Image (tube, grey):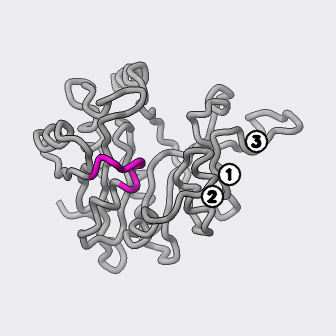
């Protein structure tokens, strides 16, 4: 089945970066989830996106490569030295003739295909955009205060102003989460391919190194990041306990 036609016959693909040596949960992308490797769930959901011609896996380990090929995914082996998924994807797509590349996290087995399509459409409709990402409303104080939940502030046109692991904005008058529209960042990005290659070669900013958030590399050089609000309920799997929560949600 061919993807839905994008304006100007643009070509969009999805790439799932997969690293074996995750700090808190080594080999998590192949952890079994309902009888399948977790990354297979990600791949199958991403394949449902209407605007992607292809979904491929960019990995750093032969075990991931073999597993991906066994369940029918296109997969490529990339350098093990990459420190972030963006750089791994940039290597994987360098020789491909594509216009838009979507970075789909390998530890998000509940990813919604509609969110992928929304991001692709943002870049397809606005040639001035180089990069887009998804955000979601924060509903609980626990989520707000968790440094593993990345917070984001946007302007009136939905461009990101800043991302942080800290609570932003600061609630000086203690009006509470019900009155301040806090949002979390979801780790999915869409890039124009040319910008992606350039981005992967840019020097890390001190902000990126402080927060350990690669999107700050773009903001500190003046690149605008457009956001789209989603209601997608997802869990990033960083621990075996996270995986158990995902399994319960699937049930």
State the residue position of label 1: 153
Q: Are marks 3 and 1 in contact (CB under 8 Å)?
A: no
Viewer-side residue, 86 vs 53: 86
Q: Which residue is mark 3?
A: 180
The prevailing secondary structure element of the residues shown in magenta is loop
The local crowd at label 3, few if under 14, some if 14 to 19, many if 20 or more residues have their Cα within 10 Å, is some
Residue located 67% across and 58% down the image: 161
Q: Residue at x 59, y 41 (%)?
A: 150
Question: Reading the chain from its start, which is encountered first: label 2 or label 1?
Answer: 1
Seen at 19% across and 50% down, the residue is 75
Q: Element under label 1?
A: strand
Part of the protein shown in magenta? 79-87
Q: Residues within 10 Å of mark 2 (few under 14, many from 20)?
A: many
Residue 244's spot in the image, x, y percent? 38, 19
What is the C-alpha distance between the residues marked 2 and 1?
6 Å
Q: Nearer the viewer, residue 191 or 155?
A: 191
Q: Seen in the image, is 100 located left or right of residue 173?
A: left
């Amino acid at each position: 089945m061919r993807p839905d036609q994008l304006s100007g016959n643009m070509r969009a693909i999805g790439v799932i970066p997969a690293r074996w040596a995750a700090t808190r949960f080594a080999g998590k992308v192949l952890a079994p989830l309902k009888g399948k490797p977790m990354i297979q769930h990600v791949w199958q959901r991403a394949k449902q996106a209407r605007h992607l011609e292809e979904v491929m896996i960019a990995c750093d380990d032969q075990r991931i490569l073999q597993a991906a090929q066994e369940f029918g995914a296109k997969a490529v082996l990339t350098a093990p030295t990459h420190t972030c998924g963006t750089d791994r994807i940039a290597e994987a797509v360098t020789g491909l003739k594509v216009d838009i590349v979507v970075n789909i996290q390998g530890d998000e087995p509940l990813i919604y295909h509609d969110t992928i399509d929304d991001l692709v459409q943002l870049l397809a409709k606005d040639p001035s955009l180089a990069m887009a990402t998804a955000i979601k409303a924060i509903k609980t104080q626990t989520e707000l205060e968790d440094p593993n939940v990345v917070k984001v502030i946007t302007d009136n046109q939905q461009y990101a102003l800043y991302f942080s692991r800290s609570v932003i904005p600061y609630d000086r008058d203690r009006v509470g989460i019900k009155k301040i529209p806090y949002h979390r960042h979801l780790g999915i990005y869409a890039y124009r391919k040319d910008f992606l290659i350039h981005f992967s070669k840019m020097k890390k900013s001190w902000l990126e190194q402080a927060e350990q958030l690669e999107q700050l590399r773009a903001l500190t050089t003046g690149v605008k990041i457009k956001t789209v609000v989603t209601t997608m309920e997802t869990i990033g799997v960083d621990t075996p306990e996270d995986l158990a929560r995902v399994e319960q949600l699937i049930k």
